[in-house]
């Protein structure tokens, strides 16, 4: 695939290149962009943006914050804002940290996400708060199963709902239930009667690798994030954890090989052996996810 993309770029066959990229999945497009020279990656990304913005931005979110930001630098704030509206706040926040400060501030104003993104950027780097998604689906413990199902049916947004988190009237996290259980109980059953109160959660100030460890240890597809008062403030999903695993794998391999000075992840740089290690980590994580859904 990479060879085909490079050949079309040399020929200047932008239309054919676009048709080829449109048939790929976002992670595959990201892998191609990683391996192209900067100028070619920009051409490939721009050609995809011209015909399919959602697909282009899904691929951009798979790149990692730093290379993603590099593909946005040089555009007007208005154009960057238009593109960033396709991303979830946590992905936007990660990318914005690598944009020039003035551009990042202007983009936040234009997208109307300055509150949500600014809130995430207020947490220290490499913490659960920085990588969480603040748009978490939760309902009051007095809501019935039937009402919960009806609310889910009306729900729309970029994040997939894996679990239903239950809160009290002060937004404290008090329980969790599976979506499957909602449809197996009488519709008038309150959530307080079907929820599990022993909820695995992580503090908003905990290190991101601690969040990844909890997801793997308890076979979770998502992990709720709480503040010091146990109020639900966000959720970390398994795709966020995969990103953390990539970063941790990079640091481990760099320490072993004495490569501490490298700034980019091995996944981004495509160094020998890095792809195998990352595929092993991702396979293990996906296996954990499949086990939790059975």
Image (cartoon, rainbow, N blue to C red):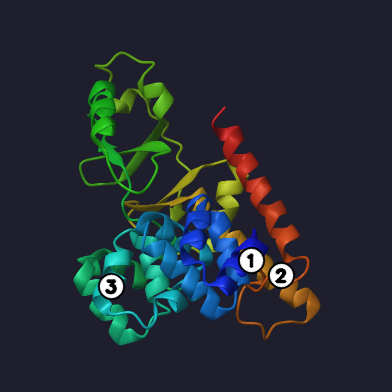
Tell me which numbered mark, 2 or 3, is placed earlier along the sequence: 3
Mark 3 or 1: in front is: 3
Q: Position of residue 79 (x, y in %)?
A: 28, 72
Helix, strand or loop at disc 1?
helix
Asked if residue 19 lies left or right of residue 281, the reply is left
According to the picture, the residue beneath numbered tag 1 turns out to be 248
Q: Measure the C-alpha gap from mark 2 to mark 1.
A: 6 Å
Is residue 204 visible in the rendered structure shown here? Answer: no
Q: Position of residue 236 (x, y in %)?
A: 45, 52
Helix, strand or loop at disc 3?
helix
Is residue 69 visible in the rendered structure shown here? Answer: yes
| Mark drawn on residue 21 | none
Q: Residue at x 41, y 34 (%)?
A: 197
Q: Position of residue 201 (x, y in %)?
A: 45, 48
Q: Position of residue 126 (x, y in %)?
A: 50, 69
State which quadrant residue 273 falls in: bottom right
Asked if residue 248 lies left or right of residue 58, the reply is right
Q: Nearer the viewer, residue 21 or 212?
A: 21
Quadrant including the N terminus = bottom right
Mark 2 or 3: in front is: 3
According to the picture, the residue beneath numbered tag 3 turns out to be 79
Question: In the displayed structure, would residue 214 be above or below residue 155?
Answer: below
According to the picture, the residue beneath numbered tag 2 turns out to be 252
Q: Nearer the viewer, residue 147 or 268?
A: 268
Asked if residue 199 lies left or right of residue 165, the reply is right
Instruction: Determine contact: label 2, label 1, CB under 8 Å.
Output: yes
Q: Residue at x 22, y 25 (%)?
A: 147
Helix, strand or loop at disc 2?
helix
Q: Nearer the viewer, residue 175 or 88?
A: 88
């Amino acid at each position: 695939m990479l060879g085909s993309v490079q050949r079309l770029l040399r020929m200047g066959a932008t239309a054919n290149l676009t048709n080829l990229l449109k048939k790929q999945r976002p992670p595959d497009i990201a892998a191609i962009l990683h391996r192209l020279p900067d100028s070619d990656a920009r051409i490939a990304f721009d050609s995809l943006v011209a015909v399919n913005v959602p697909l282009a931005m899904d691929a951009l979110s798979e790149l990692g914050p730093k290379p993603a930001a590099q593909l946005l630098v040089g555009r007007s704030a208005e154009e960057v804002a238009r593109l960033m509206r396709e991303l979830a706040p946590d992905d936007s926040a990660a990318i914005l940290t690598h944009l020039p400060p003035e551009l990042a501030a202007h983009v936040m104003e234009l997208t109307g996400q300055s509150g949500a993104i600014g809130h995430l950027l207020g947490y220290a780097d490499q913490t659960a708060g920085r990588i969480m998604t603040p748009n978490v689906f939760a309902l009051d413990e007095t809501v019935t199963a039937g009402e919960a199902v009806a609310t889910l049916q009306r729900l729309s947004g970029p994040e997939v709902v894996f679990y239903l988190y239950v809160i009290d009237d002060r937004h404290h996290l008090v329980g969790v239930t599976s979506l499957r259980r909602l449809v197996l109980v009488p519709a008038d059953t309150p959530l307080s009667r079907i929820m599990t109160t022993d909820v695995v959660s992580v503090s908003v100030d905990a290190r991101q690798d601690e969040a990844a460890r909890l997801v793997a240890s308890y076979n979770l597809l998502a992990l709720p994030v709480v503040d010091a008062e146990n109020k639900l403030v966000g959720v970390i999903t398994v795709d966020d954890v995969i990103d953390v695993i990539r970063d941790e794998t990079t640091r481990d391999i760099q320490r072993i090989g004495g490569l501490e000075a490298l700034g980019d992840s091995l996944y981004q740089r495509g160094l020998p052996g890095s792809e195998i290690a990352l595929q092993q980590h991702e396979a293990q994580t996906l296996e954990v996810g499949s086990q939790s859904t059975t």
